[in-house]
Image (spheres, helix red, strand yellow):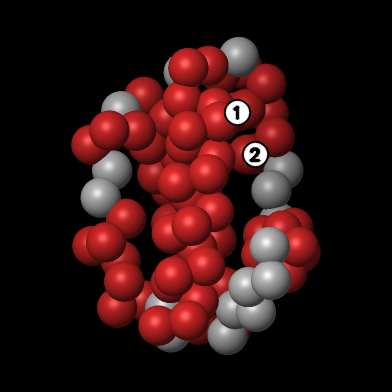
Amino acid sequence: MFNMVDKFMQNLTAEQVDNFAKSKNVTLSSEELSFTYTFVKKNYKEILKNPSLFDIDRYQNKFSEDNFKKIKKVYIEYLSKYKSLF
């Protein structure tokens, strides 16, 4: 499973991150997009290995209040849906 995720992440673009956000009704500012893209590319392995240790609330100040609420909702949704795979 990790090999497939690694391959996807190697080719991930900021545009893909932005499109995913938009599909979840999140319109990221350029600063929010830059932070999200860089953070995900840099930290995805650790988050997948230890999802229970990831504290999304630590990054609340990186997003507008409205965007953070939406992002947290999506994070919780995907965590509960896919946690058992990792």
How many neighbours does mark 2 have within 10 angstroms: few (below 14), some (14-19), or many (20 or more)?
Answer: few
Q: Is mark 2 on a helix, strand or loop?
A: helix
Relative horizontal placement of residue 32, taking residue 22 as reference (left or right): left
Answer above or below: position of 50 versus 27.
Answer: above
The image shows residue 19 at horizontal and vertical percentages of 76, 64
Relative horizontal placement of residue 46, taking residue 80 as reference (left or right): left
Residue 10 shows which numbered tag?
2
The image shows residue 46 at horizontal and vertical percentages of 35, 33
Relative horizontal placement of residue 2, taking residue 50 as reference (left or right): right
Q: Quadrant of residue 25?
A: bottom right
Q: Which of the pair 69/8 is nearer the observer?
A: 69
Q: Which of the pair 32/13 is nearer the observer?
A: 32
Residue 81 shows which numbered tag?
none
Amino acid at pointer 2: Gln
The image shows residue 49 at horizontal and vertical percentages of 36, 24
* Rendered residue at 60%/78% (across/down): 28
Can residue 68 be spotted in the picture? yes
* Rendered residue at 68%/63% (across/down): 24
Answer above or below: position of 75 versus 44.
Answer: below
Give the quadrant of the N terminus: top right
Residue beneath disc 1: 6
Can residue 34 be spotted in the picture? no
* Rendered residue at 50%/63% (across/down): 71
Q: Which of the pair 83/58 is nearer the observer?
A: 83
Badge 2 vs badge 1, beta-carbon distance below 8 Å: yes
Amino acid at pointer 1: Asp
Q: In which quarter of the image is residue 62?
A: bottom left
Q: How far apart are marks 2 and 1 (CA)?
A: 6 Å
Q: Quadrant of residue 63?
A: bottom left
How many neighbours does mark 1 have within 10 angstroms: few (below 14), some (14-19), or many (20 or more)?
Answer: some
* Rendered residue at 30%/66% (across/down): 59
Q: Is mark 1 on a helix, strand or loop?
A: helix
